Amino acid sequence: MPLLKRSVSLAGHQTSLSLEPEFWAVIDTAIRADKRSLASLIAQIDAERGDEPLASSVRVWALARHAQD
């Protein structure tokens, strides 16, 4: 399954994040429902992730959100 890459501004610099389309679908639904930007969500996840890789932390967040919805 191909990964989809998106760029976001994180802590004042551009970064890219590659995830499977299914994770992006959960994220897109969540940011629309919460009326927030992708950048603000990724910044929140980044601030809470500790030493874990960002992409892994975003996937875990998406799984938890999907289970919640």
Image (cartoon, rainbow, N blue to C red):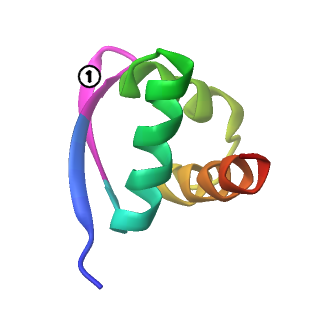
Amino acid type at circle 1 is His
Q: Residue at x 53, y 26 (%)?
A: 33
Q: Residue at x 47, y 43 (%)?
A: 27
State the SS at label 1. Answer: strand
Q: In this view, does 37 lie to the left or right of 33?
A: left
Magenta stretch, main secondary structure class: strand
List x then y, in percent, for residue 8.
Answer: 27, 31
| Magenta-drawn stretch contains 50 | no
Farthest residue, direction bottom: 1
| Disc 1 target residue | 13
Estimate how packed mark 1 is, as few (under 14), some (14 to 19) or many (20 or more) residues with alpha carbons within 10 Å. few
Q: Which residue is drawn at 56% across and 60% down?
A: 56
Q: Residue at x 68, y 46 (%)?
A: 65
Q: Quadrant of residue 1?
A: bottom left
- Relative to residue 1, is residue 60 depicted above or below? above
| Magenta-drawn stretch contains 16 | yes
Q: Quadrant of residue 7?
A: top left
Depth check, front residue: 17 or 22: 22
Q: In this view, does 22 lie to the left or right of 30?
A: left
